[in-house]
Image (tube, rainbow, N blue to C red):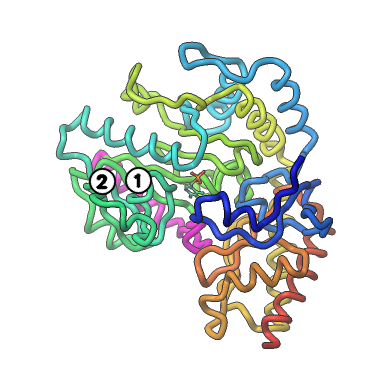
Amino acid sequence: MSQVTRADFDRVMVPNYAPADYIPVRGQGSRVWDQEGREYIDLAGGIAVSSLGHVHPALVGALTEQGNKIWHVSNGLTNEPALRLASKLVAATFADKVFFCNSGAEANEAAFKLARKYAIDNHGLDKHQLISTGNSFHGRTFFTVTVGGQPKYSDGFGPKPAGITHLPYNDIDALTAAMSHETAAVVIEPVQGEGGVLPAERAYLQAARELCDRYGALLIFDEVQTGVGRTGALYAYMEYGVIPDILTSAKSLGGGFPIGAMLTTDRIAKHFGVGSHGSTYGGNPLACAVAEAVIDVVSQPETLEGVRQRHDRLLSGLEAINARHGVFQQVRGMGLLLGAVLADGYRGRAKDFMTAAAREGVMVLQAGPDVVRFAPSLVIPETDIDEGLARFERAVAALAAV
Ligand SMILES: *Cc1c(COP(=O)(O)O)cnc(C)c1O
């Protein structure tokens, strides 16, 4: 096998990413090793994806078992893992029906198309407005990136899909003023993830629910980042006590194997009739077998209780670091999705924190230029949290010293 290095990225890969200078080759639980054999504590979970750490035995077991049975069937057929996973998701949530795809963007693409279809079927073409929030992130297809509230990601590609309104997040007055009988759907991340780990206020989600009911609009929760135990509940809507009409899930759902899902009710699902939407790989047996194993582990009360304990430990550790170094304005978030908002003197430098952390042997994320994000495995050993924090503090000290 020929040896590849980071330099090959610049040679053979489209330059839409700027990866770090090390290449991970192996993981175990919440530890990862690179080509040089250097060890990292993974407080990033990939990118809020590796919900059960790396090579979790239940997931490896499900993958290899299914891998020896059947990998692919066409959508002219169904398969057992998909039916089992869908049954479990339906049993555990508000939903009656599930559509499987391969990513968060595809789950949202399906959600937005379905919401438009439902509104237009029931009320005619004028009811097509989608209301979204500033700074939100819903994926990178042209429809989802346009619904997303970060124009820097959607500009430059020519005419955008129309009928999309962006409002400030957590702003009940703005939502009340903007909604009408032409609103097809309101889409909200219960915690804005990429946009800075900003949790919704309960009153805001409640108001969105009431306004959607008043105007016959659908409430879509994008739980691609918050779903599958990340916030300490199976889905964040349960924590908030506000039930959406459509929910999207991906990231943690596959624990590292690509899968996305859109969940909804019978009343809405029936508007996606035969032939109306689809995906070749969506709902494939391998992905569904792995996700079923993820759901089995995450929905155990001990796992969810463990998220709350780990939340407290990570949060208090970050606050202690801040008490010594004064680099954060605030640490916020839910469960194991935390954002350390950089203090004024450090604004715009989240990427420097990421790089410095990797140098000390700990993986963290950014959420925009001003927030350092933490999204570790839901079952990360507490000793790895402590060691990860110790390494992160060395990175903070190095940055604070210059
Ligand atoms: C990551 C993310 C997406 C996009 O998911 P992909 O799998 O990258 O397509 C959509 N919505 C939210 C909230 C996300 O965090």
Whether residue 252 appears in magenta in the rendering, the answer is no
Image point 46% across, 58% down: which residue?
200
Give residue 393's quadrant in the image.
Answer: bottom right
Q: Is residue 59 above or below residue 381?
A: above
Q: Label 2 neighbourhood size at 10 Å, few (<14), some (14-19), many (20+)?
A: few
Q: Is residue 133 above or below residue 329?
A: above
Q: Amino acid at mark 2?
A: Pro
Left or right: where 125 falls relative to 290: left
Q: Amino acid at mark 1?
A: Phe
**Placement of the N terminus among the 4 image quadrants:** top right
303 or 13, nearer to the observer: 13
Left or right: where 185 falls relative to 288: left
Give x and y (percent) for residue 99. 46, 27
Q: Is residue 331 above or below residue 295?
A: below
Q: Label 1 neighbourhood size at 10 Å, few (<14), some (14-19), many (20+)?
A: some
Disc 2 designates what residue?
Answer: 161
214 or 287, nearer to the observer: 287
Left or right: where 90 falls relative to 7: left
Asked whether the beta carbons under mark 1 and mark 2 sit within 8 Å of each other, the answer is yes
Give residue 115's quadrant in the image.
Answer: top left
Q: Which residues are magenta?
A: 191-216
Any mark on residue 142, and which?
A: 1
Whether residue 204 appears in magenta in the rendering, the answer is yes
Q: Is residue 96 visible?
A: no
